[in-house]
Amino acid sequence: MVDLTLPNPRCTGCWLLEDDLLHNYIQYAEQWESDEALADHIRSDLYLRLLSAIELSQHPPQVNFYSATRTQGFELVERVRGELESPTSGTRAL
């Protein structure tokens, strides 16, 4: 994921931390130049691959989005990806 995200010119940083494998979790972080760049990334097929990996987790993930003015959780992903309309059914896709 890191290798695929970093080439995006609007991505200013991307990290995968595996320091705590004893507790069976990893940390993944991205830094984007703007809220719009982050939202575009969340809507992307690449981010859908990350969501698919999260679904394989044995435990509910802890997801946090930090900005200069606020902190958000997984509801940001649901809201942004919910803006995508499924072309065949008219339903919203996650």
Image (spheres, grey):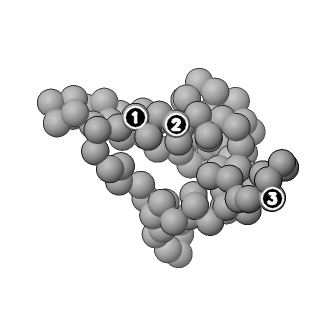
Residue 73 position (above or below residue 41): below
Q: Which mark is residue 5?
A: none
Q: Position of residue 32 (x, y in %)?
A: 63, 51
> Which residue is at the far right?
87
The disc, 3 or 2, on the residue closer to the chain's N-terminal end is 2
Q: Please identify the quarter of the rendering in which residue 90 is found.
A: bottom right
Q: Amino acid at mark 2?
A: Ser
Asked whether the beta carbons under mark 1 and mark 2 sit within 8 Å of each other, the answer is yes
Residue drawn where x is 74% and y is 39% of the image: 9
**Quadrant location of the N terminus in the rendered image:** top right
Alpha carbon distance from label 1 to label 2: 7 Å
Instruction: Give the labeled residue for mark 3.
Output: 90
Helix, strand or loop at mark 3? loop
Alpha carbon distance from label 3 to label 1: 27 Å
Helix, strand or loop at mark 1? loop
The disc, 3 or 1, on the residue closer to the chain's N-terminal end is 1
Q: Residues within 10 Å of mark 3 (few under 14, many from 20)?
A: few
Instruction: Give the labeled residue for mark 1.
Output: 56
- Asked if residue 72 lies left or right of residue 88, the reply is left
- Asked if residue 93 lies left or right of residue 30, the reply is right
Q: Amino acid at mark 3?
A: Gly
Helix, strand or loop at mark 2? helix
Residue drawn where x is 44% and y is 40% of the image: 55
Look at discs 3 and 2 and give the one toward the viewer.
3
Q: Position of residue 49 (x, y in %)?
A: 58, 34
Instruction: Give the labeled residue for mark 2.
Output: 52
Residue drawn where x is 51% and y is 65% of the image: 75
Q: Amino acid at mark 1?
A: Leu
Q: Please identify the quarter of the rendering in which residue 19 is found.
A: top left
Can see residue 37?
no
Nearer to us in this view, 87 or 50 = 87
Alpha carbon distance from label 3 to label 2: 22 Å
